[in-house]
Image (spheres, grey):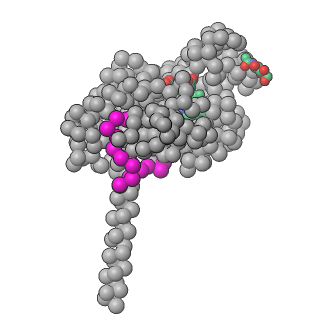
Amino acid sequence: MASRTSFLFLAFVWLALATTALSLTPNFYDKICPQDLPAIRKVVQAAVHKERRMGASLLRLHFHDCFVQGCDGSLLLDSTSSFETEKNARGNLNSVRGFEVVDQIKAEVDRVCGRPVVSCADILAVAARDSVVALGGPTWKVLLGRRDSTTANRALADTVLPSAAMDLPALIENFKNQGLNERDLVALSGGHTIGLSQCAIFRNRIYNATNIDPAFAKERRATCPPAGGNTNLAPFDPTPARFDTAYFQSLLKQRGLLTSDQALFNGGSTDKLVKTYSSNPKAFWDDFAKSMIKMGNIKPLTGKQGQIRVNCRKAN
Ligand code: HEM
Ligand SMILES: *[C@@H]1O[C@H](CO)[C@@H](O)[C@H](O)[C@H]1NC(C)=O
């Protein structure tokens, strides 16, 4: 009887240890390299100071990393003979940016730690948080301990990254496939309170949509002609360098830039939440932080899985 009890107890302890070893923790580098987080913050702050948009670009990198085979740094890998880079995928090509800053962060972190112990996947998660803070948004404790993949998957990136043309049901389904719910969808779409988009992406909406404020459409058409000017930039909201609630306020006025933005306030189930966030920065901030942690937990490699890359652009 006693041995049966102790067996069950040991089995329980083993299971507890095995599962904690596999989950992320904010203290992961406390012993290995306590200087890592200040080093990342320093480089992000300098990059955002030099160009405010870089904060937006770094936030987006973490999102596009996590949606494709989990938060494993796969987005950062360049092409090899055995796989094509995710940087060539539909939602990434000529669009995602900030890879040079990630390289700078990696170099600085490895320098202060004395060796490569911080994963590229964790660097993206921390840089995303530090970017949001640098642009006046909420902070949160980033969970750490992700390891880096040795492969990337361009075809998967093509299918799982959401497109600007999606309607609400498609967006809900897309996020559901990642374990994210409608609340996560609306809160995380609030990431569009910072950053810019290219004419080629929002052209169809500003010329053809009916759920758009005509004055706003006219304003955007001025720098986005029916043909040409594909890379001309426009902000998602009037304050693209501030993490505020202006994105949601714009949606209330049918001034969403992308079809997928306005879809969140178009008579559907997410209207109420958009309204709430538009007038309640605290509600938006709290939910954004929660959903960022949830997104950061998508299928991480942990323990002995994957590796800590020496160069974020290629497997060791
Ligand atoms: C809900 C589905 C989403 C769609 C369809 C979408 C689509 C897009 C598109 C088309 C762009 C502009 C790309 C370009 O013009 O080159 C963009 C930019 C951006 N996205 Fe999203 N996005 C979504 C969700 C998110 C999420 C969840 C985040 C982060 C939490 C995010 C953060 C950003 C940021 C910060 C930018 C601006 C980047 C920059 O200025 O460099 N997006 N997104
Ligand atoms: C407007 O929609 C039509 C029909 O779908 C399309 O052919 C046209 O290219 C669109 N206009 C712009 C400027 O995108």
Image vertical order of residue 108 relative to residue 290, above or below? above
Q: Tell whether 149 sits left or right of 111.
A: right
Residue 162 in sight from this viewpoint: yes
The residue range painted magenta reads 298-312
Most foreground residue, 216 or 1: 1
Q: Quadrant of the C terminus?
A: top left
- Snapshot quadrant of residue 104: top left
Residue 2 found in image quarter: bottom left
Residue in the image at 69% along x and 36% along y = 167
Q: Residue at x 34, y 90 (%)?
A: 1
Q: How many marks?
A: 0
Tell me, yes or no, whether the highlighted magenta stretch contains residue 115. no
Q: Position of 188 compared to 270: left or right?
A: left
Residue 128 screen position, x and y as percent? 41, 34
Above or below, 134 against 17 in this view is above
Q: Vertically, is 92 above or below 6?
A: above
Determine the main secondary structure of the stretch shown in magenta: loop
Return the x and y of residue 293 as percentages of the image width and height: 44, 45
Q: Residue at x 46, y 40 (%)?
A: 74
Where is residue 94 shown, x and y percent of the image?
Answer: 54, 23
Whether residue 56 appears in this view of the structure is: no
Q: Furthest-top residue in view?
A: 222
Asked if residue 32 lies left or right of residue 62, the reply is: left
Q: Residue furthest front?
A: 81
Instruction: Please tell me which residue lies in front, 170 or 146.
Output: 146
Q: Position of residue 241 (x, y in %)?
A: 45, 21
Q: Nearer the viewer, residue 176 or 302?
A: 302
